[in-house]
Amino acid sequence: MAINVATVQEVESTDSVVSSRFGWLRAFRRPLTLTGVIIVAIFCVLAIIGPFIAPYDPSSVSKATLQPPSPEHWLGTTQTGQDILSQMLYGTQVSMIVGVLAAVFATVLSVVVGLAAGYLGGISDEILSLLANIFLVIPALPLTVILAAYLPKTGSFGIILVISITGWAWGARVLRAQTLSLRKRDFVEAARATGERTTSIIFRDIFPNQVAVIAASFLGTVTGAILTQASLAFLGLTNVTEWSWGTILYWAQVSSALLTGSWWWFVPAGAAIALLGTGLSLVNFGIDEFINPRLRQAGIGTRKAQRAQVRPTRLKAPRRSRREARASVSGGRTGDVILQINGLEVDYVGEGSTTKAVNDVTLTLRRGEVLGIAGESGSGKSTLAHAITRLHKPPAWISAGEMLYQRDDGTVVDILTMGDEELRRFRWEELAIVFQSAMHALNPILSIGKQIEDAITAHRPSMSASERAARVLELLDLVGIQTDRAGAYPHELSGGMRQRAMIAVGLALDPEIIVMDEPTTALDVVIQRQIVEKIIELKDRLGFSVIFITHDLSLLIEMSDTIAVMYAGRVVELADAKEFYRNPRHPYSRGLLGSFPTLSGPKRELAGIPGSPPDLRHPPSGCAFNPRCPLAFDRCTVVVPPLFALSGEAEWRQAEAACLLYEGGGTVPDRASVHETDERLIEEAR
Amino acid sequence: MRVLLRRGFFYLITAWAAISLNFLLPRIMPGDPADALIEKFHGKLTPAAVQALRVLFGQGHASLWQQYVDYWHNVFTGDFGISYAYYPTPVSDVLGQSIGWTLVLISVCTVLGFVIGTGLGMIVGWKRGSWLDSLIPITTLLSSIPYFWFAICVVLLFAIVLHWFPLSGGYAVTETIGFNWGFISSAVYYAALPALTIVVASIGGWLIGMRNMMITTLSEDYVKLAEAKGLPKRRVMFTYAARNAMLPSFSSFAMSLGFVVGGSIVTEVVFNYPGIGTVLFKAAQAQDYPLMQGIFLVITVTVLVANMLADLAYVFLDPRTREG
Amino acid sequence: MTTAEMTVTRDRAEPGAAVLEARHVTKEFVVRGNPFTRRGRRVVHAVDDVSLVLYAGRITALVGESGSGKSTFARLLAALHPLTGGEVVYRGEVVDAKGGKRFRDHVSRVQLILQDPFGSFNPVATIARTLLRAVRIHHKAASPAQRRSIIEDLLAQVSLRPAAQFTRKYPHELSGGQLQRISIARALAADPDVFLADEPVSSLDVSIRLGVLNLLRRLTEERRVALLYVTHDIASARYFAADTAVMYAGQLVEHGDSEQVTQNAAHPYTQLLIASAPDPSRAVENRVRDIGQPPSLIDPPSGCRFHPRCPFAMARCSEEAPPKFAVDDGQWARCWLYADDDEAAAGRAQNADLYGRGEIRRAGRPVPDGEL
C-alpha cells in the first residue's frame, strides 16, 4: 500500500545503501569485512604457492625429532623429524581444495534444487523439499563418517564427494524460500507479462537477485567442508599420508603429542582452520548486513546518533515566537492547550551528512481536538509522529525544540527532558499511539487481551487480576470487538478487527492524547469508514485529543478540527479544517487539494502538481516547494518563508501559511489569477 | 494438532529413509570390504560371525527384499551383529555401554550452549551499537574453531599444565559404576573439561544468530509499540523482542543440533571419553562396519527425537503454527 | 525508421470497437491440502462469471475492495493464469494462450501494468537493461542501434526526457512516478491494443497521481488502445474512466457510465462504497451503519453474495443469485431490488430514503444472459 512505501522511503532515503552494480563494494569498506577478505585472500595465495615455498619435503624424516620452533624449523618438527611448516604449507593446499570444491559442488546442487523447487512449485517442490529436509535433520557427521569409511581411500576426491552430498541441504532450503518469495515479487510478474521466457526469468530476474545469498551459503559451506575434512582426517578416515590440516592433527593425536607437550605440533593446524573460518564468517557478516538493511542500521555508522540518544542532551533553545505565549494558559477545559510543540527538529545522521526530516515545527494541540497532519511521502509526518512519542530510533535524533505537555492540574512538563522512568510512566498514561499496520504493531505471539492487559499491568500495579480482566473486556466492547475474542491472536483477526484491537490497546489507560499514524491507510474504504466513525465516537465520549496523520487530505478534512500541511519537513499551512477546504492558502495545499477527485457535486477540473517531492538530502534553496510552485518568484529561491499569520480568521484557530505571498502586507493573489495558473498546470500535467 | 501430526509423519519418513540408507550403503559401495575384513581377522572369526558379515554386505543368498525384511527385523530387535573392534561383544552391548555417557554429556551441553548463547545474543542484540558488539569477532573465532582442536588446547592448559582436571576418561578407575555419590561426583569432575569445550565452542553460533534476529525484531512495530506502552524494559526485551527473535533459532535447531552432535563426537575422542564418539573412532580405525552402522542409527534416531522436541516447543511458542 | 513508423505498426480498431472481451470468465484457485489424502483441499472462487467488454480508445474502470478478485480478473485477461471457465475474446477470436508462442502473441497485444512501481523492476538491472529485454521480445528484427532509438522513443512517449538521464539508472535511484512511467514505456514496447492497469497510481503520492493518469488517458486516446483501469478508488474512476464496473466478492454487481454509477448508484454495495469514501465535497453527512466485511471466497454466501451485509436484503436474496437488471440507460445492477414486484418496490423506497434521495428508482428490465 501507498504508505508502506512512503515510510520505508522516509527512513531509507536518509541512509540508503544502494544495491547498484558496485554497491556491494561498499560492504567491504567495513573494517571487519575487510579483515575477513584479507584473511581469506592470504590463505588462497598460500594454497597456491604453498608447495613451492615449503622449505622441506613434508614427509621426509630427519634426526631432529620433536624440535620446538627454531630458525631451521619455524614451526618445529614431528616425532619423526618432519618439518611442520612444510606440512602446513602442503596441507593448506589440500584443505583449501577440499573446502572449495566441496562447497562448489554442494552450492551447485543446492542452487539447482532450491531454484527448481521454488520456481516449479507443486509436487516437484513437495518432493525436493522433503528430500532437503531429510538431509537436514540427519546428522551430517556420522553419515559422513559412514560414507567415508565405506569409500575406498581414494584420497580427497571421495571426501569432496561425501561432503557435498551431506552439505547441500541447508543452502537448498534457503534458496527455495528465497525463490518462492522472489517469484511472488512484482518484477517477476512484470517480466512474465512482458512475454519473457521462463528460462530468461530464472536466469535474469531470480538468479541475480540471489547472488548475495548464494555467496553467503557458499562461504558457509567452505567453512563447514574444511571443518568436516579436518574431523574426518583426525578420525583417520582419509588418506593419512596426504598432508592436510586434519592429517597433521591426526598424526599429532596418534603420536600423543599432547602428552609430550609438543604444542607446536597441533597448534598451527587448528589455528589455521580457526583463522580461515573466522575470515570467511567475517566476509559473511558483510554479506548479511548487505542483505538485511536492519542489521546495517545497527552498525557502526550510526554510533553518533546512538550516543546522541543515550546522552541526556540539553537542547538548544527553540526559536521564541509569539505562539508560545498562548501555550501557557492553564485549566482543563475543552479548547485549552494540552500539547505545545515548539521549534522541533529531527535529524537523520548519515555517514558524513545530516538530513533534517522535521524542520522547525511548531504546533498546538488543544483538549478534545483532532489535529490533522497531512503530507506526502518524505514530508516528515511519520518522523514527527515518532518524535512526539520519543519513539524515534537512531539514526534519527531530536536536535532542537521543546514539547510542552500540560497535565490536568495545570503543571507543564517538557516531554523531551523527561528521564527514562518519567517517560515510561508518561507514555500510554497520558499519550498513546496507534500505528498504521496493526498486523505489524501487535505482537504475533500474544493474545490481544494479553497485550491490552500488559499496558494496564505496567502502569497500575495495584490493580487486581480480575479488575484487569474486566477492564480488558470493557475496552474490547468499547471498540466493537466481541468480548469472547479476548484470547484471539492477531493473525486470527481480520484487518479491521486488528485495527480496532490496536485502538483498544491505545485506550487502555484513558490517555489524554492519541497519536494516530496512518491508522486506516492499509484498510479498504468501507472498513476505513467504520474505524474512523469509531474513533470520532470514542473521542466525543471519552474526550481525548487526537493527532491524526495521513496522506489522505479528503479524509483529514472530514474528521479534523485543525489541519497542518507538511512539506519537506516543515509545516507550510495551518488552518481550521473547514476554512482550509474552502480556501487553501499555500500553493502546495492548493495543488494537493486540486489533485483529489471528488465524488459528489459537479466534476471539477483536477490539477496535479508537476515534478516530485524534493530529496531531503539535497533540498532546494529557499522555499522547498519553489521548483514545483506555479506562483514562485525570484525571492522564493533565496528566503525560507516562516509561517505568516493570515488576517480575518477565528481567534484561536488563526490560519497561517509559510509562503512569501503572505509576507507582511504582501499581495495575496486573487482567485482569478490563481485559476489561470491552475489552468496552465492542467495543460502541463497532460 | 494437525501440525504435530504432519511433523510426526515427516520424522517417520526421515527415520525410514535414514535406516534404509543404512541398509543400502554397504550394498552399493564399490570394493569388497567383507572379504578384506575376514582376511584381516585371519580366521579368528566364528563361522556365525563370518555369515553375519556377509549378510551385512548383502552377499547372502536371500533376495534383496528378504534381506531388507530381515534387516528391519534386526533393527527392531536391536540386533546389529557383532563388533570387530570389541570382538566378540555384540554391537548392541557396545552401544548400550557408551550411549548413556554421550546422551548425558551432549544433551546437557547443548541445552547449556543454547541457553547461554541465546541469552548472550539477546543482550548483545538489545544493546546493539555498544561495546558489546566487539564481542562478535571473538565469538566468531570461537565458533570457527574445530571442536576437537579446542579440546586439545583445553586439555593442554587445564589438565597438563595446570593439573586442575583429569586428562582423559569418564570417571576415576577407583570408583564403581552405579548410583553412588563417589561415582557421580567423579563422573561430573571428569566431564567438566569435555563439557566446557562443547559449551564454549557452540555458544558462538547461537549468539550470533540470536543477535542478528534480535536486531531484526527490535525494529518491528510491535516492539516499538511495547515501548510506547511504557512497559518495563525487561518485559519489552523478553516477551516482545526475545520471544519472537528466538523462533528462527528453534526452527534452525535441526541443522545446529547435527553440527553440535558431530563436533561433540569428535571431542570425545580427544578426552578418550567412554561415549559413542570414542567408540566411533575405534570402529573407524578397525573398519568395524556393523558398529559404525549401529552408531549411525542410534545417533540419527536420537537427533530426530531431539528435533521433534524442538518442534513441539516451537508450536508451544508460536501460536501461528497451531492451526492449519 | 522514424518515430511514427515504430509506434504505429499495428492496424488499429476503429474508436469504440470492441477489442477485448471477457465472456463468463471464472477462476477458481485450489488451495492444496494434504497431497495424499486431499484433505484440507479448498477452492477459492476468486472470479465468478464475469463478462466485460473493453473498447478501443475507451477507459473502463473496474472498482472493488482488496480481495474482490479485480486484480485476478486483470491477470486472467493477460493470460497469466489459465481460466477455469468462460473465454476471453480478442477482436472476435477466442484467445488460446497455451504454450510459449501463443502466450507471447497474446501478451504482445495485451499488456499489464502493475501497482507497485518500486517492486515491478528487477532491482539489480538498469532501466536500459529492463527496457531492452522488452524491446528484444517485441522487435526481434531490430538492430542494436534501432533498439536504442526505440527505447529513447518509448521514454519520450511517457514524457521522460532526455532518455539518457533515466536509462543508466537503477530502479531505486528513481521516484515512484518516474518508475511508473517507465512501466508504461515497457508495456508500450509491445505496441499493444489493450492496457490492463492494475491500480497504476495507488502506490504514488497524490500530487503525482494525476500526471500518470493523464499520461495513460493520452496514450489511450492517441493510440486508440482499450484500457482497463483497476482501482479501489471509485472517485478516481469517476474522473478517469468512461465506464465503471463494480466488483464484489468475485462478481460484477454493477456496470454503467461512470458518472451515472457514481452519482446514481443502483446496487447497495456501490452505494455503501460511495458513502464510505472520504469526500469533503459531500453536502449531506450520511452516517454509514455497516459493520460487516467481505465474505470468504472459499465458502461464499448463497444467493447474492452481498446479502449478509445488505440493509435491504429480502428473503430471495439469500436463496437465488439476482440476474442483471437494466436500471438506466447503459447501467445495470445485479440486485433483486430492481425486480418488478411490491416487495422490491418497498425496498427501493427504503433505499431512496436512507440515502436522502427524493426520487424513488423504477424497476429494472431483466437482461438476458447473452446480452452484455
Image: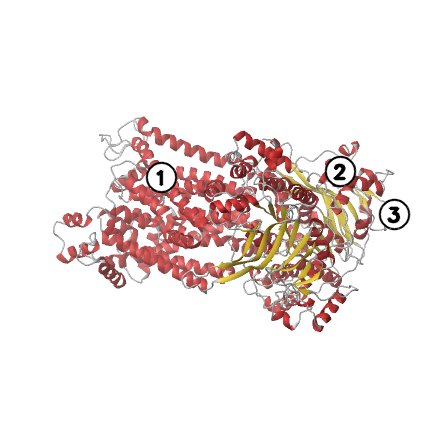
- Mark pair 2, 1: CA separation: 62 Å
Q: How many marks?
A: 3
Residue B22's spot in the image, x, y percent? 28, 54
| Mark nearer the N terminus (2 vs 1) | 1
Front position among marks 3 and 1: 3
Q: Which residue is mark 2?
A: A629
Residue A627's spot in the image, x, y percent? 73, 35
**Crowdedness near tag 3: few (<14), some (14–19) or many (≥20) residues, C-alpha within 10 Å:** few
Instruction: Pick the residue in front: C34 or A86.
Output: C34
Q: Residue at x 69, y 66 (%)?
A: C338
Tag on residue A291?
none
Judge from the rendering whether residue C76 lies leftward or rightward of residue B281; answer left or right. Answer: right
Instruction: Pick the residue in front: A475 or A524.
Output: A524
Tell me the quarter of the picture where residue A523 sits.
bottom right
- Mark pair 2, 3: CA separation: 25 Å
Secondary structure state at the residue bearing disc 2: loop
Tag on residue A648?
3
Q: Is residue A270 visible?
A: no
Give the residue type at disc 1: Gly
Secondary structure state at the residue bearing disc 3: loop
Q: Which residue is mark 1?
A: A99
Circle 1 chain = A
Instruction: Pick the residue in front: A258 or A114.
Output: A114
Front position among marks 2 and 1: 2
Give the residue type at disc 3: Gly
| Mark nearer the N terminus (2 vs 3) | 2
- Asked if disc 3 and disc 1 are in contact, CB closer than 8 Å, the reply is no
- Mark pair 3, 1: CA separation: 80 Å
Circle 3 chain = A
Front position among marks 2 and 3: 2
Q: How is the image coloured?
A: secondary structure
